[in-house]
Image (cartoon, helix red, strand yellow):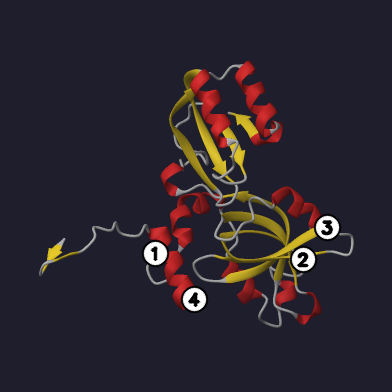
């Protein structure tokens, strides 16, 4: 853009996600929406508890006779807006995260066993649904003791059946992040074994799915075995 002899660079606009991150970093709140809005279709189908309902129910004196009480099981969804880890006396790592939906936030305790299994998923800014039990001990604000967690699927990839859009079978490969050096091996395997099955990468650092563009592979047992040998059996799924 040329204005008065000075040429302004043609800089693309921020994505909604980047804009929301910048808003929160600069002011501590969102103005243009909320990051959970990008996952609203999945959240609606899950029929979860609302964080605000849990907090409001436990803020009055009759909390113990309501739906939400100490040790009650709940399922909620949101964006992880804060995370810190702690080394236990046994040398294991546990975590404390803060999960926020559009209206409220709640602290979640992740003990060592669950954290070993879910550490890749429970990264800051990840969109997740979690199941756990309410804890109101020690007179502190209500918290959730996590027992399970799963990633939320973005609206662009979600179908009403609760799966990624398109019912055809795909190969899912879980990576800690897209900077994982093994991604080059994945592309080589795809190039050498072309077929009709799309490969979907799950990025453990962001909790997002992405389809490998221009890389459809042969979904044979030989190819699946090769992928499992590189990424481990639990990180490769054909469905």
Q: Residue furthest left?
A: 4
Sequence-wise, which precedes: disc 3 or disc 2? Answer: 2
Query: Do labels 4 and 2 touch, CB within 8 Å?
Result: no
Q: From the viewer's perspective, is 133 left or right of 101?
A: right
Query: Are there few (<14), some (14-19), or many (20+) residues within 10 Å of tag 4?
Result: few
Q: Quadrant of the N terminus?
A: bottom left
Query: Are there few (<14), some (14-19), or many (20+) residues within 10 Å of tag 2?
Result: few
- Please name the residue shown 49% across and 67% down the image: 102
User: What mark, if any, has residue 19 been given in the picture?
Assistant: 1
Q: CA distance from mark 4 to mark 1?
A: 13 Å
Which quarter of the figure has residue 80? bottom right
Q: Is residue 131 above or below residue 98?
A: above
For label 4, the residue is: 28
Where residue 92 appears, as percent x and y from the top left, is 83, 57
Sequence-wise, which precedes: disc 3 or disc 4? Answer: 4
Q: From the viewer's perspective, is 4 left or right of 158?
A: left
Sequence-wise, which precedes: disc 3 or disc 1? Answer: 1
Q: Quadrant of the C terminus?
A: top right
Where residue 204 appears, as percent x and y from the top left, is 60, 47
Where residue 89 appears, as percent x and y from the top left, is 89, 64
Sequence-wise, which precedes: disc 4 or disc 2? Answer: 4
Residue nearest the viewer, comparing 91 with 234: 91
- Please name the residue shown 52% across and 41% down the image: 162
Which quarter of the figure has residue 189? top right
């Amino acid at each position: 853009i040329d204005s008065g002899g000075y040429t302004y660079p043609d800089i693309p606009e921020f994505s909604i996600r980047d804009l929301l991150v910048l808003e929160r970093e600069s002011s501590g709140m969102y103005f243009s929406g909320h990051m959970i809005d990008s996952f609203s279709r999945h959240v609606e189908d899950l029929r979860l508890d609302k964080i605000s309902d849990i907090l409001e129910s436990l803020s009055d004196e009759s909390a113990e006779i309501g739906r939400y009480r100490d040790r009650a099981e709940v399922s909620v969804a949101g964006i992880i807006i804060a995370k810190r880890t702690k080394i236990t006396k046994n040398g294991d790592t546990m975590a404390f995260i803060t999960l926020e939906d559009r209206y409220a936030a709640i602290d979640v305790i992740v003990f060592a066993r669950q954290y070993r299994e879910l550490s890749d998923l429970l990264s800051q800014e990840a969109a997740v649904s979690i199941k756990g039990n309410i804890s109101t001990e020690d007179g502190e604000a209500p918290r959730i003791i996590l027992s399970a967690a799963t990633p939320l699927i973005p609206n662009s990839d979600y179908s009403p059946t609760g799966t990624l859009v398109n019912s055809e079978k795909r190969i899912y490969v879980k990576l800690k992040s897209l900077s994982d050096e093994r991604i080059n091996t994945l592309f080589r395997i795809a190039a050498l074994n072309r077929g009709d099955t799309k490969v979907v990468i799950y990025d453990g650092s962001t909790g997002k799915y992405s389809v490998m563009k221009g890389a459809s592979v042969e979904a044979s047992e030989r190819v699946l075995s090769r992928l499992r040998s590189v990424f481990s059996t639990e990180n490769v799924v054909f469905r």
